Amino acid sequence: MWHSFVAAMIAAVSLQAMNPFRTGKLVLWQVSYERNWHDFEVWSFVVIGVLGGLYGAAFLKMNVRMGVWRKHSWVRNYPVYEVVVVALITAVISYPNIFTRYHPLPSDLWIIRSLKV
């Protein structure tokens, strides 16, 4: 965490010294607020933050339990089977969702055609 902070500070000081956009600002576009937030807007972000924290805590707890289970189960001896099972489960869950399928763009089609022999 400390390394990230130092890297961000070095980047900010470098940008300030270089002034790449010739505006004296660190970013190209700047947002200025002319009005204050309303109470109902703040509460929606508080709810999203609380739900995200609960989801993160549940995910962390599940991840720790999964690590303990992997240590003491048959999966430890067959890592390739584990990868195949996870890939199959992911494919079965993801394929029905139209947004997780690959739909090539017209610009991608020339790459696909060039691969076919």
Image (cartoon, helix red, strand yellow):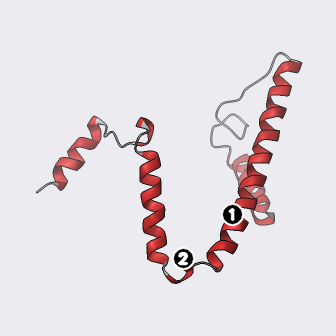
Using the rendered image of the protein, determine whether residue 37 is visible from the camera's viewpoint. Answer: no
The Cα–Cα distance between marks 2 and 1, rounded to whole angstroms, is: 15 Å
Q: Is residue 30 above or below residue 117?
A: above
Instruction: Using the image, determine if residue 65 lies above or below residue 113.
Output: below
Q: 3 and 90: which one is in front?
A: 90
Query: Relative to 102, is 36 on the left or the right?
Result: right
Q: Residue at x 31, y 40 (%)?
A: 104
Dot label at residue 46: none
Q: Residue at x 35, y 43 (%)?
A: 102
Q: Position of residue 92 (x, y in %)?
A: 42, 50
**Residue 44 picture quarter:** top right
Quarter of the figure with the N terminus:
bottom right
- Residue at 55 percent across and 79 percent down: it is 74
Amino acid at pointer 1: Asn
Q: Nearer the viewer, mark 2 or mark 1?
A: 2
Find disc 1 in the rendering and name its residue.
63
Secondary element at image label 1: helix
Label 2 amino acid? Val
Quadrant where the C terminus sits is bottom left
Q: Residues within 10 Å of mark 2 (few under 14, many from 20)?
A: some
x and y percent of residue 18 in the render?
Answer: 67, 49
